[in-house]
Image: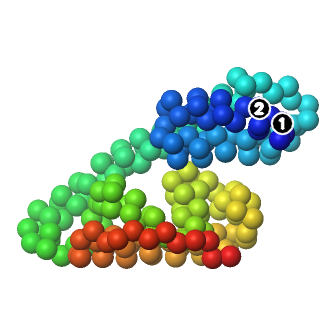
Amino acid sequence: MLDLFEAYYDRVYAFARKSAEPAVAEDATQEAFVRLLQHPRLEELEISISYLLKIVHNILRRRHTRSVRLREILDEQVTPRERRRHEDDPFAFEHPSTETLADVGSLERAFSRLNDDERDALRLIVCEGRSYAHAARSLGVSVTTINNWKHRGLGKLRRHLQAEQIFGHLPETRNVRTG
């Protein structure tokens, strides 16, 4: 497997980079190799570059589909609810709520303020739609721990977004894994 990684990693990353930003391409490339490692009949497979490219293509396609679906849900459900709330209370903009949609920059800044554990749990469960069991296996912890990280991460995201709405742009910090 190490030989495959060394032989094809750069080519698979270059392929993914054509369709995605560097961080997403890196994640998709690494996920392709992890999935390959988890394949039950890995030893029996004849693995070519085209096989790996197809894995990455599928990963990127699923991420895009989830992203589009999330935007549709937000547009259909959250935005109209906010519009109605603001129509009912014209002064609602003076009092930010947790239901107010954050712009992408605010969300990315808030996300960057989480520690690695919380960020990984949210990415796997919320962003990628993985099960708690899959996330726990991926991160090498129990399902209870994943649930705790996700719960704490969502709470911190809400607090960071509320603080930014009230006080304006906050300086970014980078937390590290807690253990």
128 on left or right of 29: left
Q: Which residue is disc 2 drawn over?
A: 7
Q: Residue at x 69, y 69 (%)?
A: 143
Q: Residue at x 8, y 68 (%)?
A: 90
Amino acid at circle 1: Asp
Quarter of the figure that contains the C terminus: bottom right
Mark 1, Cα crowd under 10 Å, few <14 / some 14-19 / many 20+, is few
Q: Residue at x 77, y 37 (%)?
A: 6
Quarter of the figure that contains the N terminus: top right
* The image quarter in which residue 170 lies: bottom left
Task: Work out whether residue 44 can be spotted.
Answer: yes
Asked if the residues shown at circle 1 and circle 2 are in contact, with their CB atoms under 8 angstroms apart, the answer is yes
Asked whether 129 or 173 is in front, the reply is 173
Judged from the image, the secondary structure of the residue bearing numbered disc 1 is: helix
Question: Residue 168: image x %, image y %?
Answer: 24, 71
Asked whether 114 or 172 is in front, the reply is 172
Q: Which residue is disc 1 drawn over?
A: 3
